[in-house]
Image (cartoon, grey):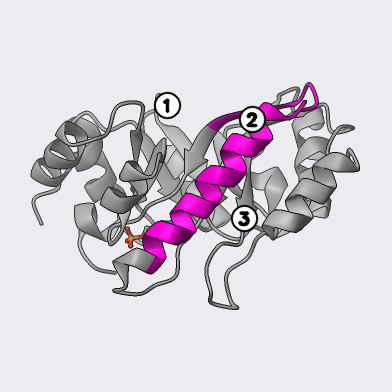
Amino acid sequence: MNIKNNINILTQNLAAGCRLIAVSKTKPVEMIQEAYDAGQRLFGENRVQELASKFDVLPKDIEWHMIGHLQSNKVKMMASFVHLIHSVDSVNLLAEIDRQAAKVGRKIQCLLQVHIAKEETKFGFSPEELQESFQQQAFDKFVNVQIVGLMGMATFTNDHDQVRSEFRSLRKLFDSLKTTSLPSNTSMKELSMGMSGDYKIAMEEGSTLIRVGSAIFGSR
Ligand SMILES: *Cc1c(COP(=O)(O)O)cnc(C)c1O
């Protein structure tokens, strides 16, 4: 794996307005440092412990993104430094992020994860649930978080049409929320979608953050 080369190619081919998150889960700090030396600054992890220990030893100008399913009791381990949590899939989790953010005197940026795939196993709000939650002002009271957009994962399939239609449905939800009156802690700026196998489609459908792991660091 030529990490530097992979980063360069991905970076050169980013759609306008889209940024690359290098997903470094399970990979050693030496490989992250190599990507850093190639100019990469946004990294994603899916386990809090691993995220915290990598944060400790790597350069402090890295933006750390939490992209994996998150248990409430782990939020405090990263509240002081996490840049953006992509995987907010319940009001309870948002409440805990709000609590921990207040403790460390920060506003933590979050994305609401939306279930767009056919698979049962993926976490997230359903589109209907999310729209209802906004209508019921369920997120308004969390003043120590900033909800900045949505995240979704497409079905793991070779059927590009299906992947595209799932990304498109998320983009439509994103756009429609944008036109509604959102609470002051919420804006629709970031649309996190696309992984190694489907980031090109995701960019065509309007992704602003692609989360790419194996296409940079090799298979896990
Ligand atoms: C692991 C992971 C990725 C990156 O997956 P690759 O297929 O290796 O690019 C992206 N998003 C989430 C939520 C992940 O857990």
Question: Looking at mark 2, is its residue's CB closer than 8 Å to ligand 1?
Answer: no
Looking at the image, is mark 2 or mark 3 nearer the viewer? 2
Total marks placed: 3
Real-space CA distance between mark 1 and mark 3, rounded to the nearest whole angstrom: 30 Å
Q: Which mark is residue 114?
A: 3
Real-space CA distance between mark 2 and mark 3, rounded to the nearest whole angstrom: 15 Å
Instruction: Report helix, strand or loop for mark 2.
Output: helix
Given the image, on which type of amino acid does mark 3 rest?
Answer: Val
Q: Is residue 41 left or right of residue 122?
A: left
Residue 14 belongs to the span the image colors magenta? no
Instruction: Report helix, strand or loop for mark 3.
Output: strand
Query: Label 2 neighbourhood size at 10 Å, few (<14), some (14-19), many (20+)?
Result: some
Q: In percent of the image, x 63 and y 65: which residue is there? A: 123
Q: In percent of the image, x 70 and y 58: which residue is there? A: 125
Residue 167 belongs to the span the image colors magenta? yes
Real-space CA distance between mark 1 and mark 2, rounded to the nearest whole angstrom: 33 Å
Disc 2 marks which residue?
178
Q: Is residue 218 left or right of residue 51?
A: left
Name which quarter of the figure residue 209 lies in.
Answer: top left
- Above or below — where is 102 with respect to 127? above
Given the image, on which type of amino acid does mark 1 rest?
Answer: Lys
Q: Nearer the viewer, residue 103 or 136?
A: 136
Residue 41: % across, % down: 33, 31
Disc 1 marks which residue?
60
